[in-house]
């Protein structure tokens, strides 16, 4: 059945992607690396992972240097949980170093900051998720299936109309795209795209920009055609992969934490 590509669709993981976190025999067969300079935090994250994946192997590192050695040496890593502030690394350079060492392994930043500029910088650099240490423990439980299913997870902007719901972009089938095609979009099209990344409906985007809802649908059809996306979910994931971030994420400049 054909669907109107510009009608509102939730950017949330489907049931199949959420079920991929376990093998048919109940064993997870997963390997995680936790990178944090506090042993107590590493222990807590390890317990949380083992509660979800009972047979998972969990490795730990307290410095960037140790983490780089492990991510290169450990085959088949499922994901890396990475703190921004380490003894030998502070901020985005650590994320970039980890991704350069093995960009095939999904990286989730687990940090004490909720600075929107920092979050946006991590996602642009290639991190697949961001979980604030100030969030409830359920945030990591929500983030893991999204990231392992090929999506992107980030906390909701405080000023967003999302009611505290996280930004979830999940569609592994979305095409890859460089930043160049996104840069060719008009200023208005880029504004529409950023508001879509906040999870806003067509009506909400139209209200924010002071235009008719039909105008937003026209913009979205044009953007999808240019970026090769088949629906809103793919469009959001394509945009993030190309380096875009929700409007509220770009409000503050990134700085180290």
Image (spheres, rainbow, N blue to C red):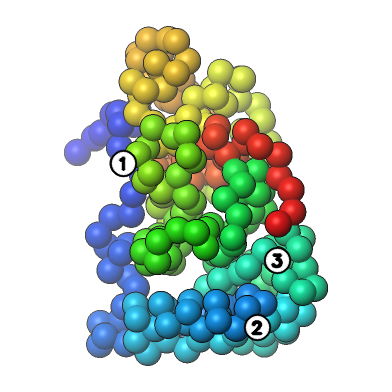
Q: Secondary structure at mark 2?
A: strand
Image x and y of residue 191, in percent:
54, 24
Image x and y of residue 35, in percent:
62, 76
> How far apart are labels 3 and 2 at the CA level?
13 Å
Q: Which residue is mark 1?
A: 10
How many residues crowd around disc 2 within 10 Å: few (fewer than 14), some, or many (20 or more)? many
In the rendered view, tell whether residue 182 sits above or below residue 111: above
Instruction: Give the side of residue 170 with respect to residue 27, left or right.
Output: right
Q: Which residue is mark 3?
A: 85
- Looking at the image, which residue is at 57% across and 50% down? 114
How many residues crowd around disc 3 within 10 Å: few (fewer than 14), some, or many (20 or more)? many
> How far apart are labels 3 and 1 at the CA level?
34 Å
Placement of the N terminus among the 4 image quadrants: top left
* Residue closest to the eye, 119 or 213: 119
Q: Nearer the viewer, mark 3 or mark 1?
A: 3
Q: Earlier in the sequence, mark 3 or mark 1?
A: 1
> Seen from this angle, which residue lies furthest left?
1
Q: Which residue is mark 2?
A: 61
Residue 23 falls in which quadrant of the image? Answer: bottom left
């Amino acid at each position: 059945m054909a669907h109107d590509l510009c009608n509102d669709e939730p950017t949330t993981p489907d049931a199949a992607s959420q079920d991929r976190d376990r093998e048919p025999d109940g064993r997870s067969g997963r390997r995680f690396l936790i990178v944090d300079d506090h042993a107590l935090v590493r222990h807590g994250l390890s317990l949380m992972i083992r509660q979800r994946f009972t047979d998972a192997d969990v490795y730990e590192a307290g410095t960037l240097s140790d983490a780089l050695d492990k991510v290169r040496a450990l085959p088949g890593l499922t994901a890396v949980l990475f703190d921004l502030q380490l003894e030998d690394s502070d901020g985005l350079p650590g994320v970039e170093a980890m991704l350069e060492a093995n960009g095939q392994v999904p990286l989730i930043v687990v940090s004490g900051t909720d600075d929107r500029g920092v979050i946006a910088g991590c996602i642009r650099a290639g991190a697949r998720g961001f979980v604030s240490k100030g969030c409830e423990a359920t945030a990591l439980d929500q983030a893991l299936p999204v990231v392992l299913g090929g999506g992107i997870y980030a906390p909701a902007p405080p000023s967003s109309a999302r009611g505290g719901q996280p930004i979830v972009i999940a569609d592994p089938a979305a095409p890859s795209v460089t930043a160049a095609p996104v840069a060719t979009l008009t200023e208005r099209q880029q504004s529409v795209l950023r508001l879509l990344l906040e999870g806003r409906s067509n009506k909400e985007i139209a209200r924010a920009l002071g235009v008719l809802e039909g105008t937003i649908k026209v913009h979205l059809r044009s953007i999808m055609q240019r970026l090769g996306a088949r629906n809103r979910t793919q469009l959001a994931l394509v945009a993030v992969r190309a380096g875009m971030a929700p409007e509220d994420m770009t409000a503050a400049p990134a700085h180290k934490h």
